[in-house]
């Protein structure tokens, strides 16, 4: 009959994209609610990424890529 994850995949793969995104959002909510994901740290990482990109990706920093 298949695993629960496979059943979920089968159902979600038939949904229109907006509804599939809604399911994905709900999964994220469940992960946070049950302590499987720390939403605050993920939001902070996402917020700092554009600023850190300049720090990580610059000519002076290229020498560290081989270390």
Image (cartoon, helix red, strand yellow):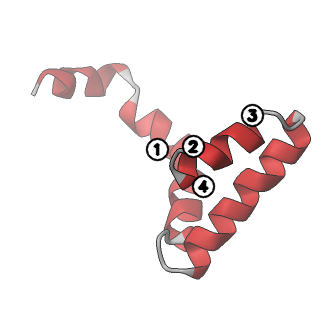
- Residue identifier under label 4: 47
Residue at image point 41% right, 38% down: 55
Disc 2/disc 4 C-alpha distance (Å): 33 Å
Residue 28 at x, y = what percent?
64, 62
Disc 3/disc 1 C-alpha distance (Å): 35 Å
Horizontal side of 66 relative to 17 (left or right) equals: left
Classify 10 Å Cα crowding around label 4: few (below 14), some (14-19), many (20 and above). Answer: few
Q: Nearer the viewer, residue 48 or 17?
A: 17
Residue at image point 75% right, 42% down: 12
- Foreground mark, 2 or 4, reads 2
Disc 3/disc 2 C-alpha distance (Å): 10 Å
Disc 4/disc 3 C-alpha distance (Å): 30 Å
Q: Nearer the viewer, residue 3 or 62?
A: 3
- Foreground mark, 4 or 3, reads 3
- Residue identifier under label 1: 52
The residue at the far left in this view is 67
Marks 1 & 4, CB-CB < 8 Å contact = no
């Amino acid at each position: 009959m298949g695993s629960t994850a496979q059943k979920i995949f089968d159902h979600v793969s038939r949904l229109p994209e907006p509804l599939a995104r809604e399911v994905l959002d709900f999964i994220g909510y469940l992960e946070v609610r049950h302590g499987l994901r720390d939403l605050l740290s993920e939001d902070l990482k996402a917020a700092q990424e554009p600023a850190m990109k300049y720090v990580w990706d610059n000519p002076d920093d290229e020498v560290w890529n081989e270390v």
